[in-house]
Image: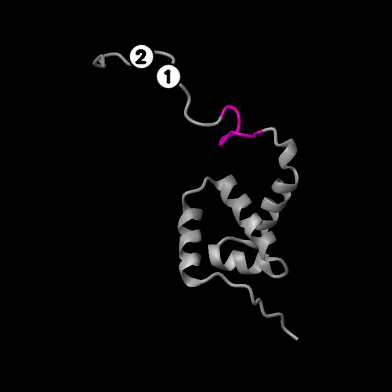
Amino acid sequence: MAFVFRSRYESGVEERVRAFYETLSEKDRRRYVAVEAQRLGHGGITYVAHVFGCSERTIERGLAELAALPHDPAAGRVRRPGGGRKKRSHPRPNSKPT
């Protein structure tokens, strides 16, 4: 006997949550889909992965991050320490002052 997931988003809601999902950072996306999967209950991971076009592994990773949330050493950070473009140490020659 196959399981049929009964709790689906309404079509308008599905479009809005997808649009919201696209505005989030990678970490926030994982956590958001994990919260949605938990809220929907049994079968939620598979359904949410289908709606948002992400893998079930991404949702499982988000669930693990939510479980460790009180001990998150990177709270408030988007990148790891040292990530991103490095600052220029010397001004370029022949550049115009701003």
Residue at figure coordinates x 48%, y 24% from the top left: 86
Q: Position of residue 87 (x, y in %)?
A: 45, 21
Name the residue that disc number 1 marks: 88
Q: Secondary structure at mark 2?
A: loop
Q: Position of residue 94 (x, y in %)?
A: 25, 14
Q: Is residue 23 above or below residue 78?
A: below
Name the amino acid type tagged 1.
Arg
Q: Secondary structure at mark 1?
A: loop
Q: Is residue 98 left or right of residue 43?
A: left
Q: Is residue 58 visible?
A: no
Q: Position of residue 20 (x, y in %)?
A: 48, 54
Is residue 75 inside the magenta stretch?
Answer: yes
**Can you tell which quarter of the image residue 81 is in?**
top right
Camera-nearest residue between 26 and 76:
76
Name the residue that disc number 2 marks: 91
Q: Is residue 84 left or right of residue 56?
A: left
Range covered by the magenta-colored residues: 74-82
- Tag 2 and tag 1, C-beta contact below 8 Å: yes
Name the amino acid type tagged 2.
Pro
Q: Is residue 22 above or below residue 44?
A: above
